[in-house]
Image (tube, rainbow, N blue to C red):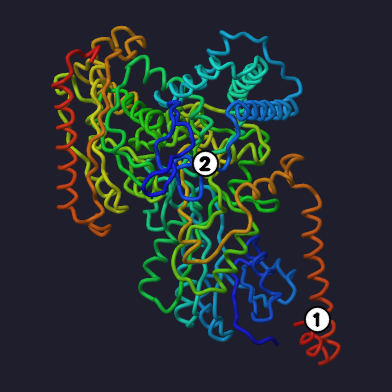
Amino acid sequence: MTNDRGGVRCQATTQGGERCKNWAVEGSPYCHVHQAVAVEPPPEQASDEQLRRQLLSELDRLVTRLRALTPDYRPPTFSPQRLVELVEQSLEELPGEVQLGIVERLRQAIDQGWFEPETWKGMWYMLNYTLQYNAGLVKHRFTGDYEADPWGLDWEFLDLVRPILTFFYKAYWRVEATGLDHIPVEGPVLLAANHSGQIPWDAAMLATATLTEHQAQRLARVLYPAWVPKTPFLSVWLARMGQALATVENGSQLLEQGELVATFPEGDEGLSKTFRNRYRLARFDPGFVQMALSQEAPIIPVSIVGAEETYVTLGHVPMLSRMTNLPHLPITLTFPWLGLLGLLPLPSKWFIDFGEPIPTADFGPDEQTNLVLVAQLADRVRHAIQTLLDDRLVRRRSVLFG
Amino acid sequence: MTDGRVVLVTGVAGYWGSRVAAQLVGRPDLQVMGLDVEASVNGIKGLDFVQADVRNPLLADLFETAKVDAVCHLAFVEARRPDPVAYDANVKGTIHLLEACAEAGVRKVVLKSSMAVYGAHPDNPAFLTEDHPLRGNRRYGYVRDLIDVEKFCTGFAHRTPALRTTILRFSSIVGPQVDTAMTRFLREAWTPSLLGFDPMMQVIHEDDVIRALVHALDHDVPGVFNVAAEGVMPLNRLRSLAGKRGVAVAHPLAYWATRALGAAGLGLQRYAPVHLDYIRYPWIGDLRRMHEELGFHPRLDAEEALRDFAARHRGGPYPSEPVWLSRDEERLQGIIDVRRQAQAEQGGPSSVAEEGEDD
């Protein structure tokens, strides 16, 4: 197997089962690709066996540790069907492609006769334990025995509400998010989106999109208006989900911490739009540009299509909203005619499109007081969002099916 | 007697004054003077006590004669309702004191204020910087007086830069001995909260308050600073750390009840630190200036401060005996020492030498 150069062909077998055609590296029977094989050449069968044993012993250790933690806990009797359900449940929070990858790998493992029933039983035990643990969470929340970051974010609470959000995201509105790769994996970013739909479901879905579908699963810190802290329960829930009051100070400080911040520059004016004004952006509060400028964070325009159709708003009753202390009280096709049932949003098909980032680093943090620049940038973002909206609306054929 | 700069502590008969004075008297580099209208203070050994009101027009003369270098102003009357007598003592007292300091060429003044001056509002940012406008609840006398004092001080500090004014705004103070709005709130068997509200809270331990005041006297850092322990936590967690159970009340009912009972003179004030708004909305201070400019770092974090409070108050609404006994003993020891000293002085001039050894 020598050639003119005096070299030798690689001795290894490729993944396809053929003989490798690369030239071997000098002083070794293998090429540069197969050097790893050269260092550690155990036959494949043995490595599998080794891995299997290692995995089993690791699982055994974990089970013993868990048993020590909860001596009273007994898992329900093993059932393959329920096990798959549990796997599905615990994978729900992960992005779609990752889910598929994991399931395919499990499937492969079974095909190769790789796992033994014992392994599956260990997995069964663990998943059941997680379930029990989550149930226990609900209990200790009410005794005040939980921690939160200085902003009030509590990951345990977030994990509790996540299934609800994922249900609305995946099953109810079947949200399709595009352009998520415009959001960097880390560092400060400001999302600016259009607001609509009377009840700010769009904020929840925007946060769910970045949390479940972005590769780094970033939590968007959505900024809420000043009526939220006055509202019982809502004030606590939103704070525990890591959201904060919309002030320039809050936004700047969150960005300074390198967070992903989401704003709705239209504010309540956007939220309370009537149906005939749908997808027409209201006035922009330029405060969001000041946040971004102060920390040199890029602004990503975001369009949310579908939320406008969750409620068909005919008009408003200012007198009633003043009486109830709410920012606005809409009259929709279903509310108040159907009572509380009328508050159920329509299951429209949603699209969330993340646009090209608009950089602000060139201007410098001192420019946040330059109101001309701030207004210009706000206009630019507004234009970008409107373009994204129009693009999507042209392509959308049906409100309910997309 | 001793050399070193003269530090004057006002309100030295009160809790804060006596503790700061007690902390300072042991130091060889300082000569500590105490000022108060009440004379119940000769418990602190080595304290040069002067009985006078801060509004006394002769104060400037006293400062000049004694060559006072720094003043720690702790003479505040804590009144719940706006009260003309308290206002006179707090606001006018501070104005008089500052004018006297400027006249006598005092170099530095340290004032103790509270973060309650920011007020608890739904539109408060998550972290209030020192520049935030003061929108405290003006119905609560003490907070109202503090706001007036601070507003005067800001103007005064601009006019007289030679007098370095340091204002420390403390968050809710907790601790085994101190009596504050927060400890009264947490001492009840059932602490109320408003249904559906759980704002973030900040606390500081009483010992760290003393440390911060002493720190401000030792370092030249004019300005206003928020001072609180590290660790911001929801009210629910704060309560559970303090070892208390909570009862949630719907907020319209709670507001109505405080108004109605307040009008009837019963006063539910003690069921909330300062005012119901303060357990409904956040009023968290930004601590960056405290760490970076003031250079003060509280020794206990919020959790430790609350655990310390809980450890001493588990028994019930009253502080456990040993704390008071030990403080009482300390005080009596001081009185005995002062008497012994006085007797020795009567005995002959040899006492001067003894004092020298002491220092």
- Position above or below: B9 against A42: below
Which x, y percent locates residue B2? 69, 86
The reply to whether the C-beta atoms of the residues labelled 2 and 1 are less than 8 Å apart is no
- Position above or below: A364 against B64: above
Q: Residue at x 35, y 35 (%)?
A: A224
Q: Which residue is mark 2?
A: A36
Q: Is residue A311 left or right of residue B92?
A: left
Q: Residue at x 43, y 21 (%)?
A: A100
Which amino acid lies under the numbered mark 2 shown in the image of this protein? Ala
Please give the label number shown on residue A399.
none
Which amino acid lies under the numbered mark 1 shown in the image of this protein? Ala
Q: Which residue is mark 1?
A: B342
Which x, y percent locates residue B344? 84, 84
Q: Quadrant of residue A393?
A: top left
| Residue lying farthest to the bottom in this orientation | B349
Task: Say which element carries label 1.
Answer: helix
| Residue lying farthest to the right in this orientation | B347
Which x, y percent locates residue B183? 63, 46
* Quadrant location of the N terminus of chain B in the rendered image: bottom right
